Image (spheres, rainbow, N blue to C red):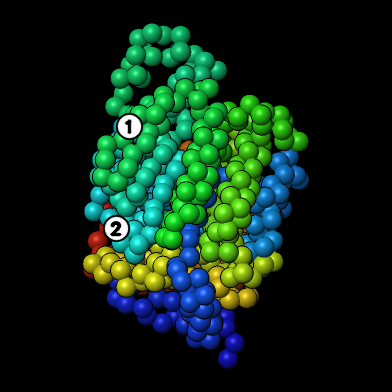
Amino acid sequence: MGFDPIATPTVPVAEHREPVFDHVEQNAAAAQRLADHVARTGRRPNILVVLMDDVGWGDFGCYGGGIAVGAPTPNIDRLARNGLLLTSCYSEPTCSPSRATLLTGRYPMRHGLQRPPMYGEPGGLQGEVTVAELLSDAGYVTQCVGKWHVGENPESQPQNVGFDDFYGFLSVSDMYTEWRDPYFFPEIVYSEERTRWIENQPFNKCFVHATRGGEPEEVEEVTIPVLSTLDEKWCAYSEDFLHRIGEQDKPWFLYHNTRGAHFDNYPLEKYLGSSPARHPYKDTIVELDAIVGRLVAVLEETGQLDDTLIFVSSDNGPEMETWPDAAYTPFRCAKGSTWEGGVRVPGIFSWRGMIEGGQASDGLFNFTDLFPTFLALAGAEDSIPEDRFIDGVDQTSFLLTADGLSNRKFHHYWLGTVFSAVRVGEYKMMLASTSDDDRDVVNPGGLTGVTQTYTYARLYNLYLDPKETHSYMIRKLAYLSAMQEGVRDHVMSFAKYPPKSIVGMNAPG
């Protein structure tokens, strides 16, 4: 009997784990491939994550964007040609929930960050177990560079949740600069009283450096001129790390988070006007592509490329309410929503000699899956906590076998504390969403709108209707039981493993 993502049943992993497809031959082949690599090299693979900010599914050339939308991305496209391009890679609707999900393998309803903390609000990694912490325990050197934004409180800072070193800022791009720009905030820039009021807000206004267990030291205040140099400085810091670590005999985890392309974009001077679009957002995409190229070049130069798994993605869909300083997606809606445009993001895996090149797959992949996958690659899967629910699925065999199949059956969509939708195969059943009506927002999509729940569930075929405009549940009732199974089992898991709210949708902090 052949595999079908809807008809094939899953098998349990453990009570506190998401069930998986059991691809027996694929799993065995991947395990042997990884074992051979470890035997040949004498070590576990390095892991490089490049996480961009607000970059859309359609921005890169390998996804149909690139030069066609005014910003060529040759370095990222080359990675995709030499690796695995995912067409159904899912983040959370906004940045901080996505980042905490990546680090913990848990949905926001479990780790507690349902929205980004703003202007000095506490974060939400206290009490969580991060992949950096477990990789460190497994002998990895752990380095975090760039945007953090899962909390400024000490318990949530990177040097206290598993990273040996952090060089970046703790919050989000616009919080450092929007009130400094007279175009957007003349009423603050031209008022000494309001400027002082913002300056006295309890959030760090500098980018910082910290080492494990230490206090963050201020490096430089993030003014608008400084902001334009951050991706350059952060790239240089990661390049230096790769050069230094290449002389050691330890595996490493580099979590490199770019500033771009979160609004407002002020590209490095050398990139101004460099894109065919000659627009700051597109110039920033060109700069980010160059950064990926530089990091890969250092891996090549230092002989580490064959030993390194690379993952490139974005933390959510485009922020359309800042258009035209915004990303591109061919799907419906944008950041802040559970329509596909808000949560379907680029996802590229590359590992020379280990991941077959020239592959594209629509197998489901969720940011939660990075947690168990990285630990499996590190030989540390036994360290996955048993006292909490882990939503991630080990996707090692999906990555390491030619034409591999995803091990994940269901993708669950949460809109803050509201269960929004479930996807299995090509079908998505939606129970609630954000409105993207022109009357609700300045530009359709983004973070404005109203949460709307449906009296009758909507069913979309994402292959026939990627814009999610034609619900035809009434004609596809045969799929209802499969969808209900995915919803029921997921929601019931919260009975034993209760949800957590640290930064809630409507809470002030």
Residue appearing at x 58%, y 70% in the figure = 354
Q: Nearer the viewer, residue 507 or 372?
A: 372
The answer to whether residue 55 is above or below residue 63 is above
Q: Is residue 180 left or right of residue 118?
A: right
Q: Position of residue 91 (x, y in %)?
A: 48, 54
Badge 2 marks a residue whose secondary structure is loop
User: Label 2 crowding class (10 Å Cα cut-off): few <14, some 14-19, many 20+?
Assistant: some
Of helix, strand and loop, which one carries label 1? strand
Q: Name the residue tied to disc 2.
A: 129
**In the image, residue 31 lies at what x, y percent?**
48, 79
Horizontal placement of 419 versus 226: left or right? left
Are the residues flagged by discs 2 and 1 in contact, CB closer than 8 Å? Answer: no
Callout 1, which amino acid? Glu
Give the distance between the C-alpha atoms of the residues marked 2 and 1, in whole angstroms. 25 Å
Q: Callout 2, which amino acid?
A: Val
Say which quarter of the image contains residue 115.
Answer: top left
Residue 59 left/right relative to 413: right
Q: Quadrant of the C terminus?
A: top left
Residue 422 can be seen in this image: no
Residue 447 placed where, x, y %?
Answer: 48, 40
150 over 478 or under it: above or below: above
Residue 436 percent across, percent down from the top left? 54, 44
Q: Which residue is mark 1?
A: 217
Q: Place residue 152 in its image quadrant.
A: top left
Residue shown at 64% from the left, 45% from the top:
289
Tag in front: 2 or 1: 1
Q: Residue at x 66, y 40 (%)?
A: 286
